[in-house]
Amino acid sequence: MKPNRIGQVAIPFAIVGVVVMMVVPLPPALLDFLLVCNITAGLLTLLSSMFVRRALDFSIFPSYLLIATLARLALNIAATRLILLHGAAGSVIESFGHFVVGGSVIVGLVIFLILIVIQFVVITNGAGRVAEVGARFTLDAMPGKQMAIDADLNAGIITEEQAKQRRKEVAEEADFYGAMDGASKFVKGDAIAAIVIVLINLVGGLAVGIVQKHMDITQAINTYSLLTIGEGLVSQIPALLVSMSAGLIVTRAATEDDLGTDLLRQFTMHKRVLQIAGAVVCLIAMVPGLPKVPFLVIGAIVLLIASRVKTDARPALADEVPALEAGPPEPAPDSPEALAIDMRVEPLELELAVDLVDLVDPARDGDLLDRVKALRRKIAKELGFVMPLVRTRDNLDLPSHTYAIKVHGVELARGEAPPGTVLVIGDDLSALPGTRTREPVFGLPAVWLPMEFRHQAEMAGATVVDRASVVTTHLAEIARRYAGRLLSRQDVKTLMDMVRASDPVVADDLNAANVTLGEMQRVLQELLDEGVAIRDLVRICEVVSERARSTKDVEALVEAVRQALGPAISASYAPDGKLPVISFEPLTEHALLETLRVGDAGSFLALDPQTAEQLSLSVAAEAEKAEQAGHQPVLVCAARIRSPLRRIVHTAAPRLPVLSYAELGPQLQLETQGVVNLAQPATV
């Protein structure tokens, strides 16, 4: 039978059997067997809690604690019934009553009370307090952990599957510590019940022996009291083991090894500590009146262990870091090679003020560079091209707390990330201290909040973002907005080589149509500038090669590609199958079609400046209304005017996609969010 089938059958049967033991008398032989099973289960629980690497690895422990407590109470009842009815309760209890405590009731009571004090006062109270604090801190930190997961996901550091797994672990951790907070009360109740049961059994045993069986006091004590003490010790030893397990579980910090390995490694981490401890123990042996052999033996053992430890295993300091393997020699600072490197204009640069260098310093937990690497992977999967390497360096000319993003040497964005703060985004931030600002991507009201007030902001329901996430998100937005500029001729060559490797026929057809690498680059740049991913590069090449036989006009090639990719483009703006659209009043659209002209630089709308401004403001006003209603609309129009119209409205509504009717997928449900009419004045 498979293990899961055994668990499905045996565990419920055992739990029902525990309840049956409270009612049905058990023979002494079966009671001996069950008592041994109880001791074994306690030992297994203790060892399992020592070998887990984190508390969640033993997530069933709260439920097991209830079952183990109930089983011990059932065994107490079964043993009490046998002692009072027959004056005997099996070999295990009799051995604990006579051999373990030497047949002395007083000694047995003292040992039993000591065990109760250890379990109830020391272990149970401590474990209960740790579980209570752990549950409180875990629940308080849960919103912050969820936001950190979302920030890492948005920055591309983790995948969607990893984010789901981490969210599941956060929820399981909160459930576990909440359950342990309640389950610790079972241990405390078990200790109290053990005392009460022993007292009742002592009184009941004396009453049965003296009153019912007419024994003298000495005989009754030897018969019933010793068995009662033995039964208490048999039950209390596994209870103590389970209590120790609960304490180990709730105090266990997540590490890579088990408790024994961590304990030995950390105690033997410092050789000098072992040497001093061994020497001190040996010196104590010289004190008059103290036994010398135990101190000398233990001191010698500690010194022997110290001699086997080679050196201190502490982390290396900055001046102790070993030299890296020698690489190729760097050019001299004034050499032509070095000057050529310095004067080169990088495609994408991130400049940091001096006080922001901690963001890229691993020694100060700076992970910005790792986030940028993950961002490149995310952009590649999202847009279909590899974002160029981001050159990150400090700039003494930047003001404090400031960073700047440059594309081909031109600064296109600037933001702030004050050290020791987090960015809080929300509707009502007046109650929070800090510097008022705007979120750099969407312009939402925000506050740079001191780190010590982070918990207060999370409890208020605001979105809390760390500095590295702010910079990474801003960099991602710039990379998406200016992706066309970042796509170099060499990048296109690499993409074309990939097409030739996977679909050589398509590449040959493209060459037969005399499409140059530069023309292909302009087509891909236009697509990226309009927010269209070029991941389906094979289809793009197929459309370009077919259309290029009749025209080499880039605008015509782009429109042909967009119509071929239309269903995918429109579906990307309608994740739930519903596409919010803004359209033109028919007469307005007809008037725009009549103004369409074709020039050397492509088609354009021959509108006077006042009409063009009114057009862009009207579109922006409708887009803003839709966004305030919670929608992300698109502007739809005839295919002939789509490209020139986008150039007009892009300044007033830069985030508004412009689609043609031919690009709307048949599977989408259109929801009209506004109609633009030039006969009516624009209101914003």
Image (cartoon, grey):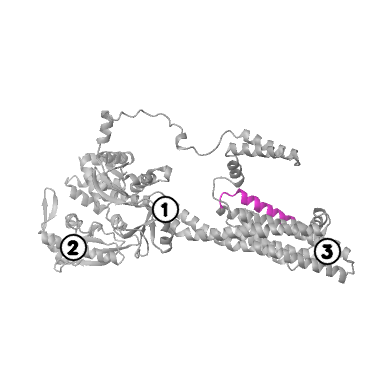
- The residue wearing badge 2 is 617
In the image, is residue 600 above or below residue 33?
above
Q: Amino acid at mark 1?
A: Glu
Q: Quadrant of residue 149?
A: bottom left
Q: Quadrant of residue 28?
A: bottom right
For the image shown, how many numbered marks are present on the structure? Answer: 3
- The residue wearing badge 1 is 160
Distance from disc 1 to disc 2, alpha carbons, whole Å, reads 38 Å
Q: Amino acid at mark 3?
A: Tyr
User: x, y percentage for residue 282?
Assistant: 69, 37
Graded by Cα atoms within 10 Å as few (under 14), some (14 to 19) or many (20 or more), the crowding at tag 2 reads many
Sequence order check, earlier mark of 2 and 3: 3
The nearer-to-camera label among 2 and 3 is 3
Q: Nearer the viewer, residue 548 or 465?
A: 465
Magenta-colored span: 36-54
Q: Which mark is residue 224?
A: 3
Q: What residue is at 25 percent from the left and 29 percent from the top?
A: 336
Distance from disc 1 to disc 3, alpha carbons, whole Å, reads 65 Å
